[in-house]
Image (cartoon, rainbow, N blue to C red):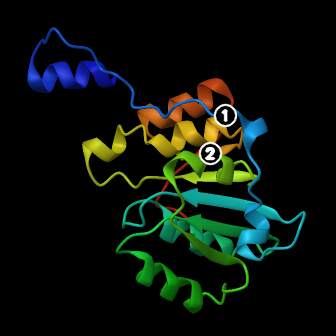
Amino acid sequence: GYTQRITDFYGPTPGAVVLNASPMVDLHDCSHDLRSALGFPAGSFLVVHQGVLLPNRGIDQGIIAMAQVPDAYFGIIGYGPHRAALETLVREYGLTERVRFLGPVPANELVCWSAGADAALCTIVGESDSYRHSMPNKLFEYIMAEVPVIASDYPGMGSLIADNGFGLTCDPEDP
């Protein structure tokens, strides 16, 4: 797996690979209403993406996919330099009523905000070995939020999701 790839690249080391995971959150302490904050109808099917808005995070493909799923809504939590391009994509696909941006929230509230969704998007596009083997914080935060994850079908996150029944995997480049 990933440990072997690191050993092959750097040679044997006395260290260990440590997964970067967020601290546990008690969902009973959560009080955020994601649908209301985004202006979506109560009871609607809501997909969430959280994190820095950059290319190759699968957000573009998530927006395009919304055009094919007319009864779903997409909430994007975060900030970053790719937001303007994402907002343009939302307008181009006529999705301004079903795809909305919440903006940044405090890091210690991400799990609670995501817990209000029905599914979570973690589809990093594998532009490099680092991306293909990534285990993003958002992945573990979605799991803590008890939200099914739609993840890239790459070795790290894909096997974590598939092997533990945490959601579904997909080709992150295919909306």
Q: Residue furthest right?
A: 43
Residue 81 sits in quarter: bottom left
SS for callout 1: loop
Mark carried by residue 111: 2
Residue 74 x, y percent position in the rendering? 67, 68
Residue 45 sits in quarter: bottom right
The residue depicted at 65 percent of the width and 76 percent of the height is 99
Q: Residue furthest left?
A: 11
Mark carried by residue 9: none
Judged left or right of residue 41, residue 174 is left
Q: Amino acid at mark 2?
A: Val
Mark carried by residue 166: 1
Quarter of the image with the N terminus is top left
Residue 125 x, y percent position in the rendering? 40, 55
Near-viewer residue (173 or 43):
43
Residue 160 sits above or below residue 36 on the image:
above
Q: Residue furthest top?
A: 14
Quarter of the image with the C terminus is bottom right
Residue 90 x, y percent position in the rendering? 57, 84
The residue depicted at 28 percent of the width and 20 percent of the height is 3
Near-viewer residue (107 or 13):
107
Judged left or right of residue 8, residue 30 is right
Marks 1 and 2, how far apart at CA: 15 Å
First in sequence, mark 1 or 2: give its number.
2
